[in-house]
Amino acid sequence: MHKYFHHSKVSPMVVFVLLLTVGLAMGQVRSVQGISCEIRPVRTKYAAVDRLAIAYSMINNTDDTLYLCKWKTPLEGFDSNMFTVTKDEEEVTYIGRLIKRGSPSPDDYVLIAPKGRVSGTIDLSEGYAVYKEGDYTVTFNSVIYDVGKETPLRLAAKKAYAPQEITSAVVNFKLTEVREYKAPEIPMRKADSAATKVTYSGGCTTSEKNDLKDAVIEAKRLLTIAILQMEITPQASQDTCRRYTTWFGTWTAARWNTVKNNFQKILDALTYQDLEFDCSCTGNYYAYVYPASPYKIYLCNAFWNAPMTGTDSKAGTIIHEMSHFYVVASTDDHAYGHTNCKNLASSDPTKAIDNADSHEYFCENTPEIGCYRIRGGPQSVILWLLVIPLILVLEFLRRRYLARSRQI
C-alpha cells in the first residue's frame, strides 16, 4: 500500500479520506488518560463445545507507571456489562452480575508498567447469552473508573471519581453451531392479591433474616413516600424540585415519568413477587444480582454493616438491587456514591435516570432535600387530609409487621 501511494498520483486528501473511511468502518476507538484496550477472539470460529475465549489487553501508552482501577474492565471478570455484543445488528443480552459497591480499595487497582500491558482471556458466554449460530461482533465499550500515577492508597482515598468512556476496535467471530443454553426463568407476575413468599439461601442466620424482613418493609415505605412526593408535585414545580434535580439532573416530563414509573415497578415487585435472599457472599461490597434472573438478591459484607435506613442503607440497597432486574427497571451502574451520582446528574441526566444508586439516594433522601411543599389554600388542606392518614397507616402497618415477624 505504501508503494502504491508513493508511485501513484493519488492526492494526500484522497488518502486522508480513505483512511478516515476505514477508521469509521472499524468503529471509533477511545482511550482514557493513556490507557487503551485491545481485544481479539482467540479463534475466528467456535464450535458449540468451545470456550468463547476473548483475549484482552489493558495497555499503558505513557512513559509513566499507572495504577488502573479494575472496575468495569475484564480484569475483574463479569461484574458489569462492559462489552457490546451483537448478532444480526441486535444486541445480545447481558447475563452476568451487577454489583452495588462502596468506594474503591487499594486492592482494586493494578499496576501497569510504562508502555506495558496487563493481558488475559475471558469467556464471553459467562457474561452474554451467546448461543445462536451465526456471526457476532464484540466491542469493549465501558468506562475507566479511575487511573493515575499516585499510589493505590492515595487514589482510593479520593471522594470523587470521574469515570471516562473507553472503547476498543470491533472484532468478529462466528459460532458454527447452536450452543446449549438454559435461559433464566422469568417468574410469572402474580396477582396483586397473592401473598408474597420470601425464601432464604446461603446460610442466612435468624438475625440476618430479621434484618432482611425489616429492610424490605423500610424499602417499601421509602418507595411509597418517594412516589407520593412525585405525585403531589405539580408539573409547574417539577423542574425546580431539588430532590429530583440533585439525583437525576435537568428536568423533562419524559425523564420525570420514567423515574416515577421505575419507583412504582420496584414497589410492585417487592409487594407482589416472590423474593429470594442469598447470604453466602463474602465480598467487600453491598450486594449483587443477575439482572436476567429475578428476584434473587445476594447480600455481601457491606450490607450487614450498613444502617437500616439512611445513606447506603440496607433498605436502600434492596431498592438499588431490585431496580437492576430487566423485568423491573433495568437500571445499570454508571456511578456510585453521593458525590459521583450528583456529578452524573449534572453531566448526563440520561444516564442518571438509568443509574441504580441515583434511585436509591432519591428514596433514602439523607440528608433531606426539599421538593414541592404543600402551601396554603383549600387544595393544600385536601392534600394533607389524604397524605397524613396514608403515612400514619404505613407506619402502623410497618410496626405491626415488625412485631409479628419478631415472633416468628
Image: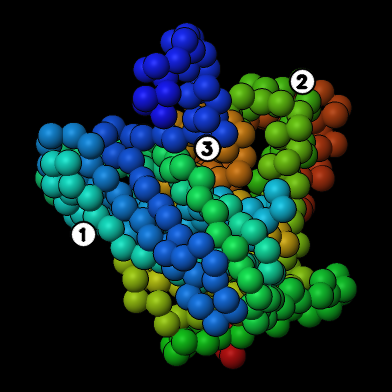
Q: Position of residue 260 (x, y in %)?
A: 72, 43
First of labels 2, 1 by sequence position: 1
- Left or right: 141 as drawn, with respect to 76: right
- Left or right: 14 as drawn, with respect to 305: right
SS at mark 2 in the image: helix
Tell me: residue 68, above or below residue 101: above
User: Could you tell me which residue is drawn at 60 percent across and 63 percent down?
Assistant: 174
Work out how far the residue at label 2 is from the one at label 1, CA to CA, in angstroms.
48 Å
- Left or right: 362 as drawn, with respect to 61: right
Q: Position of residue 281 (x, y in %)?
A: 40, 77
Residue matched to label 3: 26
Amino acid carrying label 2: it is Ala
- Left or right: 156 as drawn, with respect to 188: left
Q: Quadrant of residue 183?
A: bottom right
Amino acid carrying label 3: it is Met
User: Could you tell me which residue is drawn at 33 percent across and 59 percent down?
Assistant: 75
Residue matched to label 2: 236
Amino acid carrying label 1: it is Asp
- Disc assigned to residue 107: 1
